Image (spheres, helix red, strand yellow):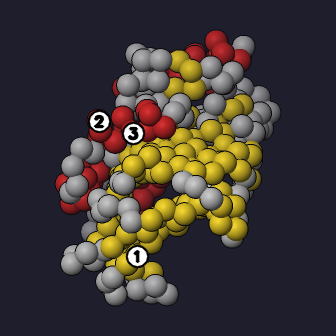
């Protein structure tokens, strides 16, 4: 029931007869939900659930008849991860309920560790609801500005076209030739995997959160995170110097900023946290090679 491509995912949620289609820009996720049975529909925003981490503080509130915002602070591999979001819906919100786990609370906002928000709307004749979700390491206001800067309209095909074109441009940097389609698929899948990380960790205006939790505004480089250096210093980073020269500049500037903030180069850096995973300091050869 699913279709997957770089920058695109679609799946039929057969339990509910809802088709979900997802794509993204750099800092904004674009969701399209088709409620095949029509009528009223709802979307649950669950701020408790996570993969290998636990929430330490979560917040959600309805801003107006089309917007919900909040944050999720959590502890896991990154001991103090902070992500803010703003979600804008294409249909008018008819009702908004907040919950602590399964217990409904009064009002239009709630703060806790097991926070959920449920957004209700009429799906209309087209039976569809689109959602643009901006994320930010700094604030809900910046998350909203990321939406305005990166996805102004309501056209999922256009967003996916640009996401697909970005991947085409990157994957075309290396050409190989073979009559064996399996070999081609293996090679380009591996090349795709080299570009999953490091990942962007700043807002469209350049703002980001540093290791000491201070906000740095309007940085003149793209701040990056997910430096799994013990995995990547031998082969991926030397490859980046050939295929990703501009991003190498951003990687090194990010590492030097981390050095200024925590007094040493990153070891295994994740979301403004030093995880100290694995011995040694692999950032030194990465910087020297760059």
Locate residue 267, reporting x and y percent. Answer: 70, 30
Q: SS at mark 1?
A: strand
Check the image and report above or below for 195 versus 248. below
183 over 158 or under it: above or below: below
User: Badge 1, how many Cα within 10 Å: few under 14, some, many 20+?
Assistant: some
| Residue 237 visible, this orientation | no
Earlier residue among tags 2 and 1 = 1
Residue 111 image position (x, y, % from top left): 66, 48
- Disc 2 secondary structure class: helix
Q: Is residue 113 above or below residue 184?
A: above
Residue 269 found in image quarter: top right
CA separation in Å, label 3 and label 1: 24 Å
Viewer-proximal residue, 248 or 81? Answer: 81
**Is label 3 or label 1 in front?**
1
Q: Which residue is mark 3?
A: 144
At x 69%, y 32%, the residue is: 273
Pointer 3 with pointer 2, Cβ within 8 A: no
Mark 2 vs mark 1: give the one in front.
Answer: 1
Picture layout, residue 15 above or below residue 234: below
Q: Which residue is mark 1?
A: 41
Distance in Å between CA atoms under marks 2 and 1:
29 Å
Give x and y (percent) for residue 91: 30, 62
The residue pinned by badge 2 equals 149
- Precedes in sequence: disc 3 or disc 1: 1
Residue at image x 65%, y 61%? 105
Return the residue nearer the eye: 211 or 189: 211
User: Residue 56 location in percent, x, y?
Assistant: 74, 46
Quadrant of the rendered image containing residue 27: top left
Crowd tier of the residue under label 3, counting other residues whose Cα lies within 10 Å: few below 14, some 14–19, many 20 or above: many
């Amino acid at each position: 029931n699913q279709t997957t491509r770089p920058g695109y995912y679609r799946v039929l949620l057969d339990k509910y007869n809802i088709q979900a289609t997802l794509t993204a820009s750099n800092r904004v996720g674009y969701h399209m939900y088709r409620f095949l049975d029509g009528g009223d529909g709802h979307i649950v925003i669950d701020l408790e659930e996570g993969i290998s981490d636990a929430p330490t503080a979560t917040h959600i509130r309805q801003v107006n008849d089309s917007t919900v915002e909040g944050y999720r602070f959590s502890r896991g591999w990154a001991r103090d991860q902070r992500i803010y979001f703003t979600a804008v819906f294409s249909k008018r919100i008819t009702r908004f309920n907040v919950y602590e786990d399964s217990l409904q609370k009064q009002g239009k906002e709630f703060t806790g560790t097991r926070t959920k928000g449920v957004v209700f709307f009429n799906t209309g004749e087209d039976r569809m609801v689109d959602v643009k979700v901006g994320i930010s390491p700094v604030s809900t206001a910046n998350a909203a500005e990321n939406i305005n800067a990166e996805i102004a309209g309501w056209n999922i095909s256009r967003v996916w076209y640009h996401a697909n074109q970005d991947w085409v441009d990157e994957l075309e940097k290396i050409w190989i030739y073979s009559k064996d389609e399996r070999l081609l698929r293996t090679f380009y899948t591996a090349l795709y995997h080299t570009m999953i990380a490091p990942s962007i960790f700043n807002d469209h205006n350049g703002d980001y959160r540093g290791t000491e939790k201070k906000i740095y505004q309007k940085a003149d480089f793209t701040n990056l995170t997910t430096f799994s250096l013990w995995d990547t210093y031998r082969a991926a980073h030397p490859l980046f110097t050939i295929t990703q020269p501009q991003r190498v500049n951003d990687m090194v500037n990010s590492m030097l900023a981390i050095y200024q903030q925590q007094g040493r180069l990153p070891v295994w850096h994740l979301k403004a946290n030093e995880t100290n995973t694995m011995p040694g300091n692999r950032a030194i050869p990465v910087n020297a090679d760059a």
